[in-house]
Amino acid sequence: MSEEKEKDLMSMYRETRPREFFGEKSNTNHLAWSLLVMLLAMVFWLVVALSGAENQRHALATKSCQDRVFPAEIDASCLKQVKSRDHWWQHVGHALVRMGA
C-alpha cells in the first residue's frame, strides 16, 4: 500500500473518531464548587456553634441553670440541655446583633 493511500485511510478513521469520550473532559470547575461546599459547611458549623454558645450565655444571664441546692453554683447538666429561647435563629440573631457588646 502506498503511503498516500495509507495517509488517506488513516485520516478517514481519525475524522470518524469521537473528539472526547464521556467523562474524559469536564467543563465544571471542580475547585470552585469544592471551595463553595467547604465554605457552606463551615458557615453551617459556625451557626450551630454560635447558637449553642448564645443559648448557654443567655441561660447563664437569666440564671435559668442555677443549682437549687447550692444557689451560688451552676447546674452543668441543665446547661447542656437548656433552651433559653424558642428557636435557634433567635440565638443567632441576638448574637450577631449584640456581637461587640
Image: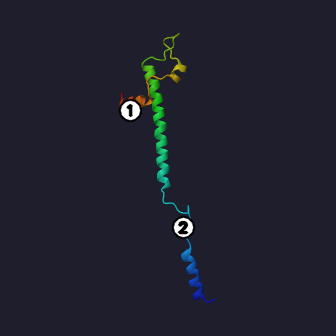
Q: Which mark is residue 20?
A: 2
Q: Which residue is mark 1?
A: 96
Q: Amino acid at mark 1?
A: Leu
| Rendered residue at 58%/80% (across/down) | 10
Q: Left or right: 71 with respect to 99?
A: right
Q: Secondary structure at mark 1?
A: helix
- Single out the mark in the foreground, 2 or 1: 2
The furthest residue to the right: 1
Q: Amino acid at mark 2?
A: Glu
Q: Which mark is residue 54?
A: none
Circles 2 and 1, Cβ within 8 Å, touching? The answer is: no
Q: CA distance from mark 2 to mark 1?
A: 51 Å
| Rendered residue at 53%/70% (across/down) | 19
Disc 2 residue crowd, few under 14, some 14–19, many 20+, Cα 10 Å: few
Say which of 86 and 77 sits in front. 86
Residue 39 locus on image (x, y percent): 46, 44
Rendered-image quadrant of the C terminus: top left
